Image (cartoon, rainbow, N blue to C red):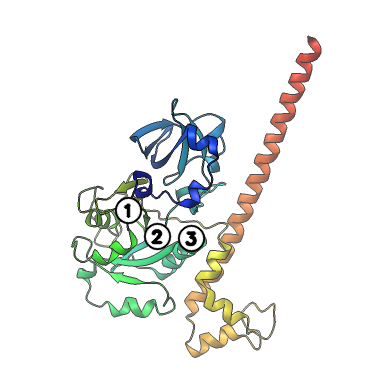
Amino acid sequence: MSPLQVLGWKPFFQQQLSLDELNDCEPVKVMAVHRSQVEVTGERGEEAVLVHGPLFEDATERPTVGDWLLLERETRRPLRRLERSSLFKRMAPGAKQAQLIAANVDNVLIVSSCNHDFNLSRVERCLALVKEAGCRACLVLTKADQDENHEQYREALKGHRDLPLLLVNALDRSSVEPLREYCRSGETLALLGSSGVGKSTLLNSLAGTELAATSGIREDDSKGRHTTRHRALYAIPAGGLLLDSPGMRELGLADVGDGLAATFADIGALAAKCRFADCVHESEPGCAVQSAIDSGELDERRLRNWRKLEREVARNSKTLAQSRADDKALGQMYRTVQSHARSRKSGEE
């Protein structure tokens, strides 16, 4: 494999380059993002690139971890960001714009643990995000050595039979060995989960070396501190890239309608059998969804969470649409003012 292929360079990205760009530019991968610059890696190795100016004025266009940028070979000036194969983003509490998490991810480990942190509704939230991006997912429950009753977790996940489940001791490298299938050379693996579940420990075990700092958790509620301070990609000796990111207690969803439908495909299939097309699955006669709950085929918690996430997606998507409209109107106003200023200056001359 070439150095770029090891970093995840694929035909999808190669086909976006013009002949001139092939000659005059060099693609680099964004490994970490800071306020005014990004750390990138390419054929020349690691370097820092300033990110300012018109190319990065739009927050949604700014590079995030995992992005590919085109740099001029001589000046090292970034010319453009390549189209993404996948994108993870969230709505942070109180935000009017989506916060980018990572781009061009191939596989995702949804990390929870065998303690108070395990929450099936949170797993479904993460799963909607992963399915929207079109990535392969695996649920990893850490701290398996601290709880012998593993069957309770398998039973809780019976509604997600297509989601692989692995119970591991993140401190034991042999225990995490099956996860190497998800971080093969040339692929990028992301870890999603709240603080204290052992993401950084898991990353270190997969890498075979100390890449990320770790810390303990509170015993009373199994919650941890944000060990990781910023999102960053790590290249591991066996090949592949690992993304470590700060634990996110709030993972707001927006523009993930397809991912949500895929996560709750069983409810969608049942809804199609309801007597009435506009059934809201409450007390309507002939409701297949409620019948499934009565028979034990469908967990009522799952229906409640589906409704909750649907409302959240609709609300956040509306906020994003309004924010985009406001930005468009503001941009138009700026252009109008500038045009009038140029016309006035021209008239004075």
Crowding at label 3, few (<14), some or many (≥20) Cα neighbours within 10 Å? many
First along the sequence among labels 2 and 1: 2
Residue 57 place in picture, x, y as percent: 56, 34
Residue 268 place in picture, x, y as percent: 58, 76
Residue drawn 42% across the image and 54% down it: 105
Query: Contact, CB < 8 Å: mark 3 with mark 2?
Result: no
First along the sequence among labels 3 and 2: 2
Q: Is residue 192 left or right of residue 60?
A: left
Q: In the rendered picture of this protein, how many numbered marks are placed on residues?
A: 3
* Callout 1: SS: loop
Residue at mark 2: 107
Residue 68 place in picture, x, y as percent: 45, 43
Label 3, label 2: how far apart the Cα atoms are: 12 Å
Residue drawn 24% across the image and 55% down it: 201
Residue pushed farthest right? 347
Residue drawn 74% across the image and 20% down it: 341
- In the rendered structure, find residue 129 and report the number of the disc placed on it: 3
Crowding at label 1, few (<14), some or many (≥20) Cα neighbours within 10 Å? many
- The image quadrant of residue 274 is bottom right
Work out whether 306 lies above or below 279. above
Discs 3/2, front: 2
- The image quadrant of residue 41 is top left
Residue at mark 1: 240
Amino acid type of the residue that numbered disc 2 sits on in the rendered structure: Asn
Query: Contact, CB < 8 Å: mark 2 with mark 1?
Result: no
Q: In front: 26, or 312?
A: 26
